[in-house]
Image (cartoon, rainbow, N blue to C red):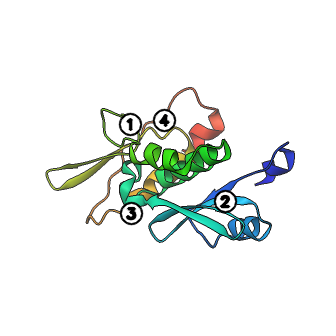
Amino acid sequence: MRMAAHCKGSALFFARDSDHSVILRQRREGARAAFVRGQDLILAAGEAQWVLLSLRRIPLTNGGQIGFPVENCLAAAGTLWALGLPLETIDAALETSGADLEKSPWCSNVLSINGATVVFDYGHNPSALLAMIAALESFLHRRHLAVYSAAGDRRDVALIRQ
């Protein structure tokens, strides 16, 4: 949000929470925003809003169950919209965003193996690790286990934080 002051153009903010203070402010000011309400991904400009599609129809989000891919989809949808692509094209892009090992390996892949849910993701910074841990809580299993390896080409402060 602080970066918006340095932007030569307008900023489009996104959040999973439709009632986030920044989203509400953007809309009051007539500016663009992308957010989720219920299970719907929505683009808005001021009071006008367009429901793109349900998170259930976006494979990458695992039905909206994993939060950080939802945020990635919001960012992508907002970017495509800002570039002037038609809403139908944005819908099609989101609906075909892969979440399987063949289309997008290590990108929010969710597999069911012998009664366990396994999530693969190439989380490569402290924020990604926190997001993955939060995602594990959305799966209703008695036990959660995370196996994590940090990339070696990160700043020391990031490696220590992880």
Q: Report the residue marked by disc 2.
A: 33
Viewer-nearest of discs 2 and 3: 2
SS class of the residue under badge 2?
A: strand
First of labels 2, 1 by sequence position: 2
- Disc 4 residue type (three-letter): Ala
Front-most of residues 138 and 88? 88
123 relative position to 17: left or right? left
Q: Report the residue marked by disc 1.
A: 106
Are there few (<14), some (14-19), or many (20+) residues within 10 Å of tag 3? few
Viewer-nearest of discs 3 and 1: 1
- Residue 66 in which image quadrant: bottom left
Q: Which residue is drawn at 48% across and 41% down?
A: 123
Q: Which residue is drawn at 41% across and 40% down?
A: 107
Viewer-nearest of discs 2 and 1: 2
- Disc 1 residue type (three-letter): Trp
Front-most of residues 66 and 133? 66
Residue 64 visible: no
Gap between marks 3 and 4, in whole Å? Answer: 21 Å
40 relative position to 161: left or right? left
Query: Relative to 107, does residue 4 appear above or below in the rendering?
Result: below
Spot occupied by residue 98 in the image (x, y as percentages of width and height): 37, 41
1 relative position to 60: left or right? right
Q: Which residue lies furthest to the left in this view?
A: 114
Which mark, residue 137? 3
- Disc 2 residue type (three-letter): Ala
SS class of the residue under badge 4?
A: loop
Q: Report the residue marked by disc 4.
A: 150
Gap between marks 4 and 1, in whole Å? Answer: 14 Å
First of labels 4, 1 by sequence position: 1
